[in-house]
């Protein structure tokens, strides 16, 4: 099935599942690495619709749907961090490049960091975009998690009955996309199967983050850019945004080729609010 987000393909996995991906641009045979994009929690390739064309001007860029999201096969396995890292590795094997520049938003950041630590020779650079930080206490609050999981369960049930709920922030983000991208995105993100995949990722989050925090992973000695959103539109964000930005800065400063960038016009959704900045930082690593 064609996609307005790029040329489609499927990466087969050992258990019979398939990961759907889209690509734009091309490698020019000058040693320029392919860029692979890792989305945030419950997000598919759709998240990168405004970034991909800008990166594709210089090299091939790939965005994919994690299991159960977009057009990828659902996964019966628990969707913990390790499972997501494993799936990413199979995708990169399928794409067939020796090394990649990897860029990830939100949950995509920890996924890429875990992969890079375990496979340092395959990573040419990292761009972590307002990445989730496993030390942040918010991810472990039981009351917040219980409420969120309950809301997700109700939303899944309503979607199964044909009632499509699109949160206000999602509507704001989609309004930034061209009409044809909006149409394709809405057709997928309001399905019960998509919402179940999102809930599965969220349910396994604390244990995966706890293991990541305990492992004290070491990133390879490659360029690492950490982008932080500067704005905090909600009360919860205003509480944790300074701590999140400080953690991003510490991570960048701990890397031999680390760089911290503040996205002045963005909150958490930097790839949609400032796609030019994200693309610029990705392309900086290519040069």
Image: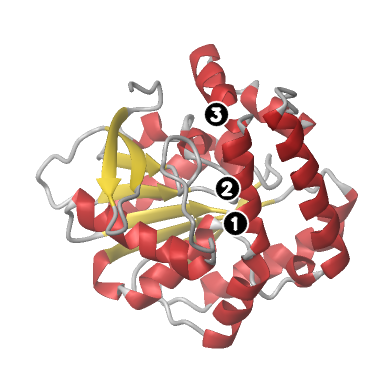
Mark 2 → mark 3, Cα distance in angstroms? 12 Å
Mark 3 crowd level (few <14, some 14–19, many ≥20, 10 Å Cα) = some
Mark 2 in CB contact with mark 1 (< 8 angstroms)? yes
Residue placed under numbered mark 3 in the picture: 188
Q: Residue at x 50, y 33 (%)?
A: 46
At horizontal 47% and vertical 30% (from top left) the residue drawn is 49
**Which quadrant holds residue 21?**
top left
Q: Position of residue 263 (x, y in %)?
A: 62, 47
Q: Is residue 33 left or right of residue 144?
A: left
Q: Is residue 287 above or below residue 250?
A: above
To which residue does mark 1 refer? 201
Does residue 283 show up? yes
Asked if one can make out residue 177 in the rendered structure from this viewpoint, the answer is no
User: Please, is residue 274 above or below residue 84 in the view?
Assistant: above
Q: Is residue 23 left or right of residue 77?
A: left
Residue 57: x and y in percent read 29, 31
Disc 2, disc 3: CB below 8 Å? no
CA distance for labels 1 and 3: 17 Å
Secondary structure found at label 3? helix
Q: Position of residue 71 (x, y in %)?
A: 43, 35
Where disc 1 sits, the SS reads helix
Q: Which mark is residue 240?
A: none
Out of 217 and 189, give the one closest to the viewer: 189
Kindly state the secondary structure of the residue where label 2 is placed: helix
Where residue 1 appears, as percent x and y from the top left, is 33, 22
Residue at x 18%, y 55% (from the top left corner): 97
């Amino acid at each position: 099935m064609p996609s307005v987000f790029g040329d489609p393909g499927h990466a087969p996995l050992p258990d019979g599942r398939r990961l759907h991906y889209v690509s734009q641009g091309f490698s020019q045979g000058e040693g320029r690495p392919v860029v692979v994009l890792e989305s945030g929690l419950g997000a598919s390739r759709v998240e990168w619709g405004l970034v991909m064309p800008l990166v594709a001007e210089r090299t091939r860029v790939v965005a994919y749907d994690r299991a159960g999201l977009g057009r990828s096969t659902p996964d019966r396995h628990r969707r913990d961090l390790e499972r997501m890292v494993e799936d990413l590795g199979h995708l990169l094997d399928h794409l067939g490049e020796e090394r990649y520049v990897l860029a990830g938003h939100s949950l995509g950041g920890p996924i890429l960091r875990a992969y890079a630590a375990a496979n340092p020779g395959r990573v040419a650079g990292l761009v972590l975009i307002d990445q989730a930080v496993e030390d942040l206490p918010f991810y472990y609050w039981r009351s917040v998690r219980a409420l969120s999981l309950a809301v997700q369960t109700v939303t899944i049930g309503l979607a199964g009955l044909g009632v499509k709920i699109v949160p206000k922030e999602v509507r704001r983000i989609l309004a930034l996309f061209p009409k044809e991208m909006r149409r394709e995105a809405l057709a997928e993100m309001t399905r019960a199967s998509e919402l179940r995949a999102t809930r599965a990722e969220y349910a396994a989050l604390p244990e995966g983050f706890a293991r990541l925090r305990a492992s004290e992973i070491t990133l390879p000695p490659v360029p690492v850019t950490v982008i932080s959103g500067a704005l905090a539109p909600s009360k919860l964000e205003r509480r944790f945004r300074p701590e999140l930005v400080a953690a991003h800065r510490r991570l960048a400063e701990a890397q031999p080729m680390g760089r911290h960038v503040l996205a002045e016009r963005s909150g958490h959704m930097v790839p949609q609010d400032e796609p030019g900045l994200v693309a610029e930082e990705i392309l900086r690593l290519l040069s």
